[in-house]
Image (spheres, rainbow, N blue to C red):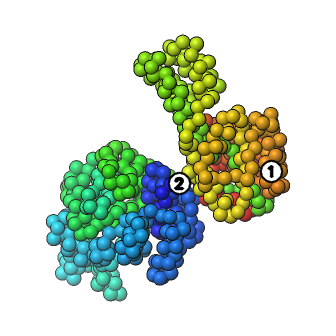
Amino acid sequence: MNSAILVGGGGFQGLPVLRALHSIGWRVVIADSVRESLNRFEADAFCQMPEARHVQAFREALFALVEAHSAAAVFPTTMFDLPLLATLRPDLESRGVRTFASNPELISLLSKKTQSEQAFRDARLPVLPSVAPGNHDFSFPLIGKPSRGWGGTGILRAPSLAAWQEVSKGGASIDHLWQRELTEFFEWSVDFAIRASGECSPMVCRRRLRSTGGFAVVNEVAQGGQVETLALQTATWLAAQGGYGLFNIQFLQEQDGRIWLSDVNPRPGTSSVCALESGVNLVQFLLDESRMPQAPTPGWVVRTLSETFLPRLNRPIKGVVFDLDETLICQKSWMQAKLDLITTPLHREIGSESLARFEMEVMRIIDEGPWNQLIDLALERSGLPATLAGRLIALWRKAHPEQLVIHQDARAFLHVLQDLKIPTALLSDNPAVSQKQKIARLPGDLSFKAVVLTDELSAPKPDTTGFLAAASALSIPPEQLLMVGDSPWRDGLGALHAGYAGALLISRQGSMTNPLRSMFKAVCKDDYNRRIAWVSSLFGAERILNG
């Protein structure tokens, strides 16, 4: 599995890159100077780094991290780390690590507003004319942007001559670029990427309909028209100046239709996840130069906050027991792979249309159930003879797919446990023959000290027999164990009845189980509810281990 390092990637600016990497199966390591970074709860690994201002310490830590994780790519995510990474890029790339930072000269230019505004004018890009406040009649208000730096901090306003005189008293106004302040306008944000060859990705244009704290929470992805044309012109100019990697630029569109380029950021925007949501993976565009994404799908992207609660257990965890299906592996993908194997011998016997109907019905039952009637019901629905059932069931039982789909968050959690030298066990229901097939296909980096199959014990969950057997195999008392599973009724209750310290219940979209939390909590005693964590991801779940 490929790994990428997101430098300064613990905040909102790193999130778009993280999710884009995960969507194509890459492993993500967050390298951030802030220990309690949000994205450590979505990433495969986290490393606290020195701040970029400590150049030598930062460099040594980054190169050590690259080596430790065999990283194939490095992405800057903030303007604090970008200038230094731009200077380190040649050294990193000489080691085979792709580093998506623009040329240092371009980054330096874009950080100086007066020089960059002049460069944009020279390139015939639409920027608001600068104004000298001392000679201005204040027929319109002025806004002053710091001549150096990024973002919206340090902005001054002068709506009148009196206000300008007050602002200018402290001398701060001297180091600002002054322009006409727009009062009514639409704000456009455009996300794109530039390859090393200078090739530009599709422009993802979005109107910022609602922002809070400078964070766009309601966006409309739209065909940008003139905005898109201007964005492509800007991207082409940036590419010619050594632009490389992810970009976010912003335009202001006045009520009369005039459009002004207001900001150019050579790094991902805080809301550039909108590109991925609209069907454009800008990170994949950079990593796979054989692919060109389609144009974005128009629509609305609404961003809200979500919460995860990890209970503080009454004692430290000394061992972790994992469920297999839908916790560690994708059971539906395994069943789909079996389908591919059993239908191959039937191509000569069954017409292509009939076989296609059968495959469609099998896929439907894999997704919806009932799974214990899969072959019989699929034959009936597709109009094929029931006499095929015996042969297909025999083929199904013998089919042994070569690969499993491992849930990436579970894999990351297991790696953390291995690093912490916390022993793990596997405890699984379902027929032992099929479970042994899956276990045999687990990749080499995932190993367990013990494997307990309840089918061999004739004690399916939530019977405590299997849970106690796992504790015995690990030589750890049940009260020092954590159960990780997907079913509150089988994994949660079984573990707590057996005396486990707690249970982590992973709820995945598209899984074979979809428990109703309110129903379980209504019938489960309060002590159990306090020791069960319901999570949508196992990234960062190690927080629960220390009691």
The quarter of the displayed image where residue 105 is located: bottom left
Dot placed on the residue nearer the N-terminal end, 1 or 2: 2
The structure residue drawn at horizontal position 33% and vertical position 49%, both measured from the top left corner, is 291
Above or below 139: residue 466: above
Query: Could you tell me if residue 498 is visible in this image?
Result: yes
536 and 485: which one is in front?
A: 485
Q: Position of residue 241 (x, y in %)?
A: 24, 69
Say what secondary structure mark 1 lies in: helix
Q: Position of residue 86 (x, y in %)?
A: 36, 73
Image quarter where the C terminus lies is bottom right
The structure residue drawn at horizontal position 78% and vertical position 36%, both measured from the top left corner, is 456
Marks 1, 2: nearer the viewer:
1
The structure residue drawn at horizontal position 21% and vertical position 54%, both measured from the top left corner, is 229
Say what secondary structure mark 2 lies in: loop
The quarter of the displayed image where residue 330 is located: top right
Q: Amino acid at mark 2?
A: Leu
Instruction: Point out which mark residue 305 bears.
Output: 2
Do callouts 1 and 2 mark residues in contact (Cβ within 8 Å)?
no
Q: Amino acid at mark 1?
A: Ala
Instruction: Point out which mark residue 168 bears.
Output: none
Give the residue at mark 1. 473
